[in-house]
Image (spheres, helix red, strand yellow):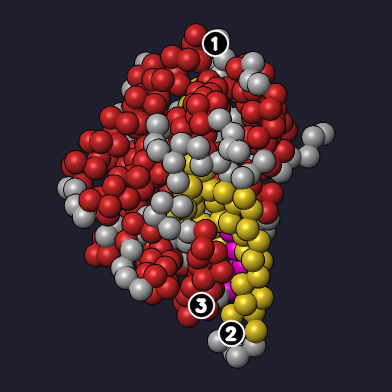
Amino acid sequence: MTHHTALTVALKQLKIAAEKLDLDPGIHEILKKPKRSLIVSVTIKMDDCSIGVFNGCRVQHWDVRGPFKGGLRYHPNVTLDDVTALAMWMTWKCAIADLPYGGAKGGISCNPKKMSQGELERLTRRYVSLIFNYLGPHRDVPAPDVYTNEQTMAWIMDTYSQLKGYSVPESVTGKPIEIGGSEGRVCATSRGVALCAREAAKILKLNLKNATVAVQGYGNVGYNAASIMHSMGCKIIAVSDSSGGICCPDGINPDEVRAHKLKTGSVINYKNCTNITNAELLETKCDILVPAALQNQIKKDNADKIRAKIVAEGANGPTTPEADKVLYERGTCLIPDILANSGGVTVSYFEWVQNLTREHWTLEEVNKKLENKITKAFYDVYNLSKKEESDMRTAALMLGVGRVAQAIRTLDLWP
Ligand code: NAD
């Protein structure tokens, strides 16, 4: 059986797109590797006065369409290869959403659940100081990802600004509103997932009212997706987090489950629900499945057990290429990550534009612009998939890789 890492998946996807596009082999070679990978040792004083040494990195894939943009992940298992794959996906994602950005991603291998706020703050500030010369509003603009949040982004903005000597809100996105964050950013990734699922449901003639939904991962993306889809009339029948999941055929109230998770640390053991495993969650009979945790969840060995009609990928890289094939052959409508979760970077772009122009848009304005942009991207990808008789992932990759390749050809190589 093929052993997958996020990077082997990303490279395989690039190969599929390169073949379909009949891409120049030289350009394919360029796109296989990031333009720059920074590896840093993040050394901080822990609360008990011992010294903590953490591996950190920032991978900048390609910036031919604009400055680098991408999240920062804190996770014990994060590797340079994972971050490289995530940076590559960001490049395609920005191109599909037609944003003037290139792809990047950062990671620090640490266990944030076992660290105090003070330790996380020192970790974040030290990390920023180590890669400071390669950051900036016109170089590379970080954003939140797994186990980083608005507070982390505030520390990044402050550290960057202190080192510059003046306030630079446009140096990072996903900030709290009071320091230049955008309305609608916290929910943007999930709103995009929900809007894509809505369009897919229209195509499948599936009524969203009482459509059943299962969500894997109950963090920023998973919880907000459940909440927005609930407000669209869907019934949320199963959710999970790293401790396990819960199932309730009558549907749960996402906010009440959120309150339960905040109180107890997990969604499990919630009233009137059956506890299930994460594997069972993925196999739940439902109309819409939203993977919103980590990569490599739907694989060859469980793909034929997925019973959802629509899979809307909130997480990055939850499905392997073999599983893609199985799902496509079974007629599952899979909305790929690089399209489905592009709402986050889209509103990050809106935040950056607001910061650069010193404006602040209303929530209605932000949500309307997001809806226009992601719906257009959805139909660009969907129509290409019909034309190419391919799954939506292949079409999305063709669109994203094709646009980046075109930019490389236009700029040409210097010197
Ligand atoms: P988060 O830290 O807020 O939440 C992650 C959730 O996943 C938590 O509920 C955690 O318990 C759960 N989880 C972790 N390991 C798990 C496991 N093995 N099985 C099941 N659940 C598990 O992170 P997030 O920002 O919501 O990101 C989730 C996914 O969405 C990631 O793949 C991320 O790259 C992707 N994403 C996030 C954004 C964004 O704007 N935050 C944008 C695009 C894509």
Give the residues drawn in magenta, as a range. Answer: 107-114
- Residue 388: give its label: 1
Vertical position of residue 301 compared to residue 139: above or below: above
Q: Residue furthest front?
A: 415
Q: Can residue 349 be seen from the camera position used here?
A: yes
Give whichever of 299, 108 is nearer the camera. Answer: 108
| Of the image marks 1 and 2, the number of the one nearer the N terminus | 2
Neighbour tally class for label 3: few under 14, some 14-19, many 20 plus, Cα within 10 Å:
some
Q: Is residue 111 magenta?
A: yes
Q: Can residue 256 be seen from the camera position used here?
A: no
Q: Quadrant of the C terminus?
A: top right
Residue in the image at 63% along x and 20% along y: 23
Q: Are marks 2 and 3 in contact (CB under 8 Å)?
A: yes
| Of the image marks 1 and 3, the number of the one nearer the N terminus | 3
Residue 175 picture location, percent across and down: 34, 60
Q: CA distance from mark 1 to mark 2?
A: 55 Å
Vertical position of residue 177 compared to residue 366: above or below: below
Q: Give the residue at mark 2.
A: 45
Q: Give the residue at mark 3.
A: 122
Q: Under tag 2, what secondary structure?
A: strand
| Of the image marks 2 and 3, the number of the one nearer the N terminus | 2
Q: Under tag 3, what secondary structure?
A: helix
Q: Is residue 331 left or right of residue 11?
A: left
Q: Is residue 151 magenta?
A: no
Q: Quadrant of the N terminus?
A: top right
Q: Amino acid at mark 2?
A: Lys
